[in-house]
Image (tube, helix red, strand yellow):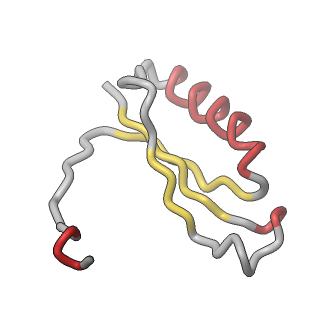
């Protein structure tokens, strides 16, 4: 099982992120805020992929208090 684990360094370059609090279903609102902010800085999103970094345990935290970092790369 542990033979399948590998560690590697990933260089993301320029990116934008937001701390999203609440339901995962509400993430589109946070992405909209990120897009508006990037637009004000004349930055463009690279691709449709993004990263989610879960700061809360879904099984121990109420939905409205869940925290997630949402991040995507810019050019």
Above or below residue 40? Residue 63 is below
* Side of 8 where 46 appears, left or right: right
Q: In this view, does 44 lie to the left or right of 19?
A: left
* Position in image of residue 32 (x %, y %): 66, 29
Where residue 6 appears, as percent x and y from the top left, is: 18, 67
Where residue 43 sits: x, y (%)?
A: 41, 23
Q: Which quadrant of the view contains residue 46?
A: top left
Q: Which residue is drawn at 42% across and 33% down?
A: 49
Residue 38, above or below 4: above
Which residue is farthest front? 1
Quarter containing the C terminus: top left
Q: Residue at x 17, y 75 (%)?
A: 3
| Image position, residue 58 (x, y; %) | 69, 70
Name the image quarter holding residue 56.
bottom right
Q: Nearer the viewer, residue 72 or 43?
A: 72
Q: Quadrant of the N terminus?
A: bottom left
- Decide if residue 26 is on the left or right side of residue 9: right
Give the camera-side residue of 3 and 53: 3
Q: How many marks?
A: 0
Residue appearing at x 54%, y 48% in the figure: 70
Q: Which residue is at 66% across, 34% downward?
A: 33
């Amino acid at each position: 099982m542990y033979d399948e684990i590998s560690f590697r360094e990933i260089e993301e370059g320029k990116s934008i992120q937001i701390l999203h609090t609440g339901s995962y279903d509400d993430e589109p609102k946070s992405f909209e805020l990120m897009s508006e902010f990037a637009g004000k800085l004349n930055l463009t999103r690279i691709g449709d992929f993004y990263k989610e970094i879960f700061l809360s345990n879904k099984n121990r935290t109420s939905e409205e208090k869940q925290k997630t970092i949402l991040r995507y790369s810019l050019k």
